[in-house]
Image: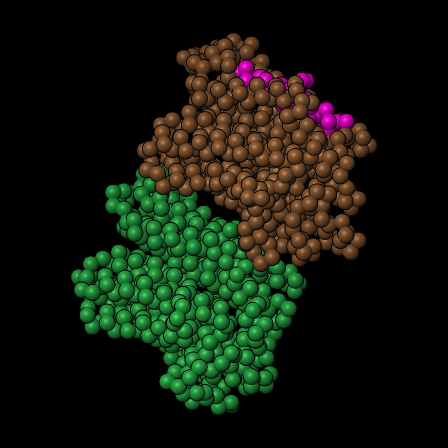
Chain colours: A green, B brown
Amino acid sequence: MIGVGAETWLILCIALPFTLAVAAYVVGPRANLYVAWLAGLAIPLASAGLCYGVVTEGAIRYAVGGWDQPLGIALHADVLSGLMVLLSAVVGLVTCLYGHRYLGGADDASSRSYWPLWLMLWGALNALFLAGDAFNVYVTLELVTLASVGLVAMTGKAVSVRASFRYLILALAGSLAYLLGVALLYAQHGVLDLVMLGEQLGTDWASVAACAAVTVGLILKAALFPMHFWLPAAHGSAPAPVSAVLSALVVKASFYLVLRYWLDVFPASVTDVGSFVLSGLGAAAIIWGSVQALRTPRLKLLVAYSTVAQLGYLFLVLPLLRDAAQRDAVVTGLICLALAHGLAKAGAFMAAGAMQRVAGDDGMHGLRGVSVSTPVAVFAFALAGISLMGLPPAGGFGAKWVLLDASIASDNWLIAAIMLAGGLLAAGYIFRFIRVAFHTEEFAGSVVTRHRTLEWSAMALALAALLMGFLVEPISIWVANAGAAGTTQLAEVVP
Amino acid sequence: MTASVLMPLIVLLSSLVPAVLIFLLPADRHWLRGAMSLGGATLKLAIVAIMLWGVFHEQTYRLTIPFLPGLPLTLHADALSMFLITLSALLWLFTTIYAIGYLDNAPHRRRFFGFFSLCVSATVGIALAGDLLTFLVFYELLTLTTYPLVAHRGSAKALQAARTYLTYTLGGGAVLLLATVWLYHVAGTLAFREQGFLNGLVAEQGPTLTVIFFLLIAGFGVKAALVPLHGWLPKAMVAPAPVSALLHAVAVVKAGAFGIVRVVSDVYGIETSDQMGLLLPLTLAASFTIVYGSVRALAQDDLKRRLAYSTVSQVSYIALGLSLGSPIAALGGIVHLVHQGVMKITLFFCAGNLAESAGIYRVSQMRGIGRRMPWTMAAFTVAAFGMIGIPPLAGFVSKWHLGVGAAAANQGWVIAVLVTSGLLNAAYFLPIIHTAWFAVENSVNGKSDDHKDAAEAKWPLLAPALFTAALSMIIGLFATADASPLTWATLIMRREFGL
């Protein structure tokens, strides 16, 4: 990382995955192995470089092609976006290993479309996290959606195609709402740069309307209850490495944008009513998602409903941002929760995929006693579950601690109570599966074939989620430093 | 300097590293696995012995690991930590030997011993926790690592019991988390300190601190099996005998009781909580639990269930002693932490031997078994006499101090509770002993007796039971010796009360 500027890493984070996506498409499945390794090593390296630069040197702005605002396209990296890029890097690296093993040889039809689509998705996610203006965000959001829809439909099974179509319709509706909000902003202020917009927006009706349109569009894509109905089918029917990425990163991208807009663009325009409505929906999501996870007959659907519930937390605590004294703590908590959920959920889906491989199916009944056959995957699932339940020392615990502290400090007892109840509900559905796995009944699936790469990939992510609790303190320091430097007053504009 | 950091780390790692290695080891490497478990347990005991010497000579052992913002994980050895850690290190070694013998040829041994070692790591963490957050972290880890042990057999009944266990303990954990965050918000620190760290806040935040106190006690009360939070304990009896021994004597219920001790003495301070009027409700809850557990134990024919209700009753002696606010009663409560552990583990070892060697699970099946398994029943008898409180056994020493302390605190009615409980203990233990030694083996319903060809248990099962039975005699007989639990508890009390 020494000798190479953070701006270079910034460009590489976006350029590398897109280039590799094109290469994978042109060269075809013959080169899958090389693409997997190259992507899995190079992109995380660039992401780590970027993150290191952001943490040590502060936020970075980069004007693409030297065109300055308001004409050009701005890229923007701060602690929030740097950590999201890093999350994509960690999940992406493991996904490359897992995906290569899971999808098998080059003659597999689905592996032909997997690598170009997945790398395009990775590039689009990085571009989204690093986008500095509202229209650029729209473009990357659409790219993310299209790549995700393609990945869901990849296997060509009827159920996946149906799910992907529903996902597409919903996501397009979300994009339209978002675009409407951006149009309102542009008509009024004539700029699209997020920082500049943030300086101009107020409490007038147009700003509030724009804020509402943008937020509605984003929560459609973030699958906030009751707009979640497309998610379980799409995430549950996709192949495991795709489900992992969708649940860990794609929905998180939409949430990231909500947070980005609320922190940097709309702080003045967000109304108390608006934040409490989202909080209420978040609470409903926690309860509804958990209850569904307690009832569903399939393991991957259980994990997908858990995503619905876990996304609820992210919205539940948004009202706490209104208290300026708690802002840094809440941002820290939200970042940690998003990261911990990303790692844990990717791990849980990968573990589910490994078990599905030996059981032939992900029905709960067929998985009885599966711990005999895939002990590592079951263990990984349980460790990921610790983070989802918010038990120590996992990242989920650290995040919950910080957020509980903030909600008590601002007298939001109901939010604290729902967070605690959500943890217990999560324990309910995680242990529901553990009971199945421990069952003494003879395991019906294969006990001979082991998929060590699949199982240990899941384990790696689950361990990362478990140990993420120890990152809460550094993240809180980075957030506080960035807050002190002023997120809006950026160091310099690099041509 | 470095030794003070390294010692707590080694104590923690001496079971954590074997746990990880056991999981990674192929399932059929039984000898190597056994060697690692025993090696870790022995190393731990040796380090603990060194630390005991150090703490006695006022040496500090402290290790901090950065964790949450402003709240590092702190492992700190004070006199009270050493008390629990010595108990667990010692009993763990014996339970490991016992478990290796007990689970000979059983399935899923790798999983069992892996979680077994993780469980002791969590207990060590609880003992060494230097603040409430660290305590909470290891307390929750203990819940998670004991779940697979309770569910070990995988039968519908075992899974159901494990589910009940989890529901209770995770619920308690959530209450505890809320109380801990709240306390941190109010006090700005969570670090345990002898005589408490809240003295300055009582005037301002009295009502809030009262609410937090009862939330904390409720959270710990689940594992300490305070009535009405005890429901999980009798059900968890479905677990294998070494696990029951562990749950009842060292790990789970002790973690709860130890939590109550920490809250009363090192968060609020015994004197401060007495002044705030927090202790009387605790006295009442503990007294009720003591009598209730004993009454319920009377009615159980299942041996392990009878022992379980006995645990419900006996563990509350610890809370009772702390809640009287007098140094002598507190001494009796603290010392019971060790005494109850040593006696109860003996009883469970013996119950396991009866089940394993003779297929005996119920008291009514035990007629005349003393003649076939004399050593097992001898150990059982000693431990049961100790539980009843017959001098000079360990239980008597605890009860004596509790009684004297109650008198000193002008709470004479507590002596009545102690006497009632003693009589009830006798009422549910003596029939077992009488049946085992003096009843004639007879044929039931025309069938020949169940344990006609039962012989004495094999030595890995017998030796630990005999040792702990002997220990419960020694720590009672030599209660005033320099190295006895009572002397150490006196040291703790002197530091807690600032005497």
Left or right of A315 on screen, residue A143: left
Tell me what residue is drawn at x 57 percent, y 67 percent: A480
Query: Residue placed farthest to the right in the image?
Result: B410
In the picture, residue B356 is in which quadrant? top left
Left or right of B101 on screen, residue A357: left
In the picture, residue A271 is in which quadrant? bottom right
Tell me what residue is drawn at x 47 percent, y 70 percent: A54
Q: Is residue B33 above or below residue A311?
A: above
Image location (x, y in percent) of residue A473: 54, 59
**Quadrant occupied by the N terminus of chain A:** bottom left
Image location (x, y in percent) of residue B344: 57, 26
Image location (x, y in percent) of residue B150: 47, 36
Q: Camera-side residue: A401 or A172?
A: A401
Stretch in magenta:
B377-404
Q: Is residue A255 above or below residue B321?
A: below
Res. A426 in view: no
Q: Main secondary structure of the magenta part?
A: helix
Left or right of A228 on screen, residue B227: right
Q: Is residue A207 above or below residue A21?
A: below
Tell me what residue is drawn at x 36 percent, y 29 percent: B31
**Is B301 contained in the magenta span?**
no
Tell me what residue is drawn at x 58 percent, y 21 percent: B471
Q: How many marks?
A: 0
